[in-house]
Image (cartoon, coloured by chain):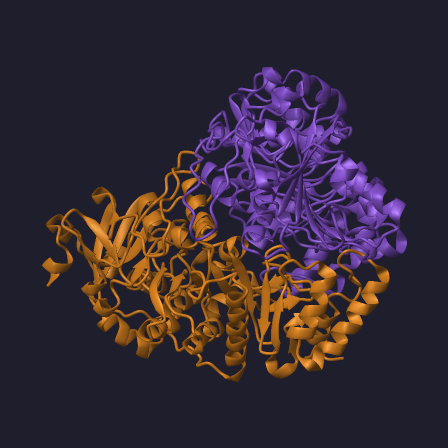
Chain colours: A purple, B orange
Amino acid sequence: MIEQRIRNAAYRDKMMSPSQAASLIQDGMTVGLSGFTRSGDAKVVPLALVERVKASGEALKINLFTGASIGDEVDGVLAEAGIINKRLPFQNEKKMRAKINEGELLYIDQHLSHTAEQLRNGFLPPIDVAILEIVAITEEGGIVPSTSVGNSSIFASMAKQIILELNLAQPLGLEGIHDIYEPEKQGRRQPIPLVGVDQRIGTPYIQIDFEKVAAVVLTEKSDQTSAIAAPDHETERMAEHLIEFFEHEIKRGRLPRSLAPLQSGIGSVANAVLHGFLKSECTDLEVYSEVLQDAVFDLMDAGRVKFASACSITLSPERAREVIANIDRYRDRILLRPQEISNHPEIIRRLGLICINTAIECDIYGNVNSTHIMGSKMMNGIGGSGDFARNALMGIFVTKSTAKGGSISSIVPFVSHVDHTEHDVDLIVTEQGLADLRGLAPRERARVVIENCAHPMYKDALLDYYREALKRGGHTPHLLEEALAWHVRYAQQGTMQN
Amino acid sequence: MIEQRIRNAAYRDKMMSPSQAASLIQDGMTVGLSGFTRSGDAKVVPLALVERVKASGEALKINLFTGASIGDEVDGVLAEAGIINKRLPFQNEKKMRAKINEGELLYIDQHLSHTAEQLRNGFLPPIDVAILEIVAITEEGGIVPSTSVGNSSIFASMAKQIILELNLAQPLGLEGIHDIYEPEKQGRRQPIPLVGVDQRIGTPYIQIDFEKVAAVVLTEKSDQTSAIAAPDHETERMAEHLIEFFEHEIKRGRLPRSLAPLQSGIGSVANAVLHGFLKSECTDLEVYSEVLQDAVFDLMDAGRVKFASACSITLSPERAREVIANIDRYRDRILLRPQEISNHPEIIRRLGLICINTAIECDIYGNVNSTHIMGSKMMNGIGGSGDFARNALMGIFVTKSTAKGGSISSIVPFVSHVDHTEHDVDLIVTEQGLADLRGLAPRERARVVIENCAHPMYKDALLDYYREALKRGGHTPHLLEEALAWHVRYAQQGTMQN
């Protein structure tokens, strides 16, 4: 069994327990953890570290770098233990979010393609220890990641020491679905040769330095997947608006029936919208995304998606059991790449992706907030949405037109935080309708966003704001003294309604 | 003489007067004009069009697309005549700005690398007529641009008809400094082969369809260059802070003595800061930018810059006379490319540029406004700053810490418009100092931006805001009811000071 998984015998001499491995981690270190959207994250060594700190009472703080979010259990336990100094580039866990918003944990919310470059250039603290989940070590000593690649390859190449978590609960059948390509340093780099979604440009394993491997730990702990909300009436309406739009573009000759490779952000809304393609007449679709959620596999099963590339597979518990157990059914139709390749501006722009990401709120001029609740409180992070939207063929943002039972309008006069500027947002879609902002000036955008996307109960108030602002003039007319009044009202009165 | 300039005889039969050529332009058309930062713009045909409209009194509106800004005379006269419906992707002219802010002219402020893609994808109105300034037509019928390439090649390939303005005041010696490469449509595209600043990847002329050429017009009207403010005490201080920072990075081994290829935005401040490199110990510098201003040629003359690539040469009147008359001295050390190549995310990221652009205002968390005065009024536009900053090795923004004699602080609690998000801004530099934001969380950024960059007369007020906001908590602490109060105060009282 182990011989199948650790095919290079020298590595077997490095096996130790999680707590032995965790003893390598010292105060002040920067730790790079595998894991992207709760998949393929290192699990047992970080948890053993927390156990050690709890038992010893030692004062220990580490910087924690990952691919994106990791399982709630690990991020939650680490946050609760109070041992994180800095955390980047993404998180999605309740207890950690609370610590971030209390200022007890320093969070750096980065474009997901940027972390690798910043490490390579020495602009971030060097990685002392990389802890990487794998399914196998090859004869030549390459390591095979599990359900995500994320930042594992850059962590492996930059780290001083490497701890491998060989996860026997992840099937060996995952071997062969990875494509690892690491660009040279900026300035000495050749073009990344990827010109098609299904193209292999690297190796099916991460090549590592044997000397740096400090421990191999066995584990059987599964990815801590989470339920994905099923499509509801509102997400179905959003999907219908989008499909109708694509049909229109096909008729106008601006898109072929196979559209363009699709990217879809993490989360229930984006998944539900993608699900809507089941009802479309689109075929031969391709997916070039950072994460493959349930909808992508449903679309593959339905014969609509012919190939999907990403840096992670994140499924609901039921779908995970099915897909991972039957990975052979999909292995010729999926590839997992490092996140700097799945999210690389060079590739996104070259392939011309249709990118669908979730907004928290949009303003009437097309600026989008993806990260902050009422301007101050971090929700999750920007993730890859900036990598994608800026370089997309079409940058599409979806959101329900209201939140909290209608007390919050997702269409506001002025967003309380900007993650995507008016220069980057092509379409906004709510259950109310779709605003096609391509080729529109700000005053044109305001009318179409209010008319097509706002909830009826907020339309008049938005129009009132816009009309008053128009009297003052300007390219992007605003009443600065009232621009954020909707958010202030919500904070004070619990509703944006006047 | 003409035989030297129009070397393909068939084109000589297409010669006509500016007013004859202007008669091809009809109401409702979309016109693509050569020109980038007031250089190499088509001049006499647009002016003849205005003459015609004035004389006839006809109701005519056109959409005007360019590379970037064109000469004040042309944009100003067109704006004044009231014949522009939509204008994109950049402008920099007083009368036009007034019309934009009055809402009489619809302006679309785009990333300068985006226009070509949007035209190619049919997301903008098709170009009816392209009017392109050139210095020559080759034997094979290729056209040689003058002092800018801008969007000329995409306009030429997409336009239904082409009018050529052969400018005899632009020296034939410009022939050979252009490198024209046009990517295929997204999705069918190969990697752009450029891996070095001095590398040629295309042809020294734009290949066009002879059948589409409707007119060749002779002109001797020079580029309408404008004076560039000389470095002053404050821009010299900014340059010193930056040079000191680079020396520090060199000592830490993060940059070589030749740094990385430099990009510098248009305008007096960026030019003055670049000028500061004359006093540095940096050698073998390379420039990969959208525009070459006086400072780049000064640095070449001083032996500091060895090669410079851009899509335009924009010089002060004195420097223009010198450089253009002695173009042979520089011809082996400069290349002018289409703006989608000079500003292409693929190339910017690959080469790892150091990008220096001007901010109107920055907030304490590192968000930057490059375009709007007090949130509503358009100044010029985002230009290429978004193409560069997002994909740079280092995204640097420079601004004087105050404006209007101290009544405006350029460091504010909350910017009134966001063009560059906190995710994209690595350094902020004012005459007060430099804030290195790499690897910092928002709360850390606030302290360093206030401490290092704000003017002493605004420091306490910024700290007060920040400390009050901290009491409310959040990842990015804000007091939304006061966030824009500084701008409101300026509008009401003529100063941000309390």
Q: Quadrant of the N terminus of chain A?
A: top right
Judged left or right of residue B365, residue B481 is: right
In this rendering, is residue B10 above or below B92? above
In this rendering, is residue A85 above or below A299? below
Judged left or right of residue A363, residue B270 is: left
Picture quarter containing residue A330?
top right
Q: Is residue B335 visible?
A: yes
**Image coordinates for residue B27, horizontal then vertical, percent:** 39, 51
Q: Is residue A172 visible?
A: no
Judged left or right of residue A455, residue A347 is: left
Front in this rendered view, residue B408 or B232: B232
**Image coordinates for residue A374, horizontal then vertical, percent:** 78, 53
Front in this rendered view, residue A166 or A377: A166
For image coordinates 66% across by 79% down, the residue present is B455
Front in this rendered view, residue B247 or B120: B247
Front in this rendered view, residue A355 or A243: A355
Tally the marks: 0
**Image coordinates for residue B470, horizontal then vertical, percent:** 82, 64
Judged left or right of residue A88, residue B32 is: left
Picture quarter containing residue A407?
top right
**Image coordinates for residue A3, horizontal then vertical, percent:** 63, 21
